[in-house]
Image (tube, rainbow, N blue to C red):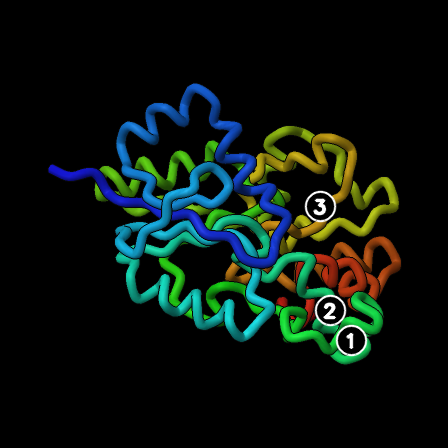
Amino acid sequence: MSKPRVAIFDFACCEGCQLQIVNFEEEILDLIGAVDVVEWREAMSEQSTEYDIAIIEGSITRPEDAEKLKTIRERASILIAIGACATIGGINKLKNNFDLDEVKEYVYGEDAKMPHLNTEMTMAVDEVVKVDYKIHGCPIDNQELAYAIRCLLMGKVPVIPDYPVCVECKSKENVCRWEYGEICIGPITRAGCGAKCPSASFRCFGCRGYIDNPNVDAARDVMEKHGLTAEDLKSKMVLFGSKQGPTI
């Protein structure tokens, strides 16, 4: 039986999630032994138009990138979006809050009108094509990606948490960051990270995106307890949730 062919592509991103794949170290040998990596710009010069699984990092910010992504989707049986940029648009989506022409001029100055800088409003991968599976985070947890790939190789569907980071925080007996006067968006953010930021004495920034059905009433209760408003919370949601997110 032939091994599944895997291609890894990147769009607008820092490529930190691909670096996490490299950080598999010894485990990457087992994964590579189970699949045939046919394209990965960061690690090899070969390219291919034939692959079974496409792994996408990065958000879509140019018309030509959207077209390339559509071609990738047509060729791949399974498409996996990895990292916040691909799954929710990431920090790149901050520009969607401003006038695009002003953003171009601010970033590129007099070069803003050059064709290769023809950027548009940022989109997550699933705003352009159908995504089969998402590996969340900024950057991803390489063990979560390894788990997902192993599941797919065994014909199983990987289970990605759909409960809030608060659940993991409580299991670790962390003192709630709200008690420190911080606006933490763990109550509406998808778990699966092991509550790494709160466990390291930082609030949750929401890099894994929102759970499908956030308990907005509970979030509102927390804000009222600490004398804050929905607008206070929304101001912190912008970093990883520009132009999207639950209505509070």
- In this picture, residue 69 sits left or right of residue 139: left
Q: Position of residue 34 (x, y in %)?
A: 26, 32
Labelled pair 3, 1 in contact (Cβ < 8 Å)? no
Q: What residue lies at 21% left-to-right and 38% top-to-bottom?
A: 3
Q: Is residue 226 above or below residue 19?
A: below
On residue 98, the disc is 1
Q: Is residue 18 above or below residue 87?
A: above
- In this picture, residue 107 sits left or right of residue 18: right
Q: Residues within 10 Å of mark 2 (few under 14, many from 20)?
A: some
Q: Position of residue 97 (x, y in %)?
A: 75, 73
For residue 218, which quarter of the picture? bottom right
- In this picture, residue 107 sits left or right of residue 160: right
On residue 52, the disc is none
- The quadrant the C terminus occupies is bottom right
Q: Nearer the viewer, residue 177 or 201?
A: 201
Which residue has dot 2 on it? 95
Q: Position of residue 89 (x, y in %)?
A: 60, 62
On residue 204, the disc is 3
How many numbered circles does the render carry? 3
Query: Can I make out residue 210 in this image?
Result: no
For residue 244, which quarter of the picture? bottom right
Disc 3 marks which amino acid?
Cys
Disc 2 marks which amino acid?
Lys
SS for callout 1: loop
